Image: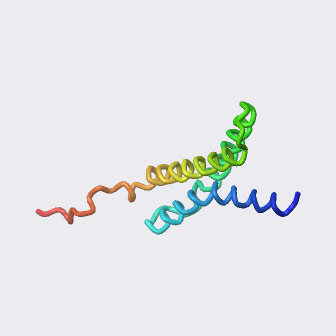
């Protein structure tokens, strides 16, 4: 395994895992439970889905391996970020409040 292969793998993993990591840090700043809650699960599922889609694309005979691997990495990365966002919002009711402008009850 040469240096170029290692660099390409690191770039693809960064593209794959950076969006959910940014969502986790954003949710941490919004007073969510913990920034790593569910993150390892999302990372592992993303890796399995991206690998499966890449193997399937190769199996059906797509002609541009670099293009479809990059496209799959971007799409699965964004999908993981959206999944983590909605998973965290449903787990923490404080993020679902709609009464931000309403004050205390007036009697």
- Quadrant where the C terminus sits is bottom left
With 47 as the anchor, is 76 left or right in this view?
Answer: left
**Residue beneath the point at 60% across and 60% down:** 18
Out of 5 and 48, give the one closest to the viewer.
Answer: 5
**Residue beneath the point at 62% across and 47% down:** 71
Out of 77 and 21, give the one closest to the viewer.
Answer: 77
With 4 as the anchor, is 68 left or right in this view?
Answer: left
* Whether residue 26 is situated above or below residue 67 in the rendered picture: below
Percent position (x, y) of residue 51?
71, 43
Q: Residue furthest bottom?
A: 29
- Quadrant where the N terminus sits is bottom right
Q: Residue furthest top?
A: 60
* Whether residue 57 is situated above or below residue 50 in the rendered picture: above
The quadrant in which residue 2 appears is bottom right
Q: Residue furthest right?
A: 1
- All told, the count of numbered labels is 0
Q: Residue furthest left?
A: 107
Out of 93 and 49, give the one closest to the viewer.
Answer: 49
**Residue beneath the point at 55% across and 48% down:** 79
The scheme the figure's colours follow is rainbow
Percent position (x, y) of residue 47?
69, 48
The quadrant in which residue 95 appears is bottom left
The quadrant in which residue 35 appears is bottom right
**Residue beneath the point at 40% across and 54% down:** 93
* Whether residue 32 is situated above or below residue 51 in the rendered picture: below
Percent position (x, y) of residue 86?
47, 50
With 53 as the anchor, is 102 left or right in this view?
Answer: left
């Amino acid at each position: 395994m040469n240096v170029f292969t290692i660099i390409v793998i690191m770039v693809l993993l960064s593209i794959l895992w950076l969006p959910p990591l940014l969502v986790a840090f954003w949710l941490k700043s919004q007073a969510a439970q913990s920034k790593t809650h569910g993150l390892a699960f999302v990372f592992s599922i993303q890796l399995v889905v991206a690998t499966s889609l890449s193997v399937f694309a190769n199996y059906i005979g797509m002609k541009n391996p670099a293009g479809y691997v990059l496209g799959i990495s971007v799409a699965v990365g964004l999908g993981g970020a959206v999944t983590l966002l909605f998973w965290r919002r449903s787990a923490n009711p404080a993020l679902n409040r709609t009464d931000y402008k309403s004050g205390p009850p007036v009697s």
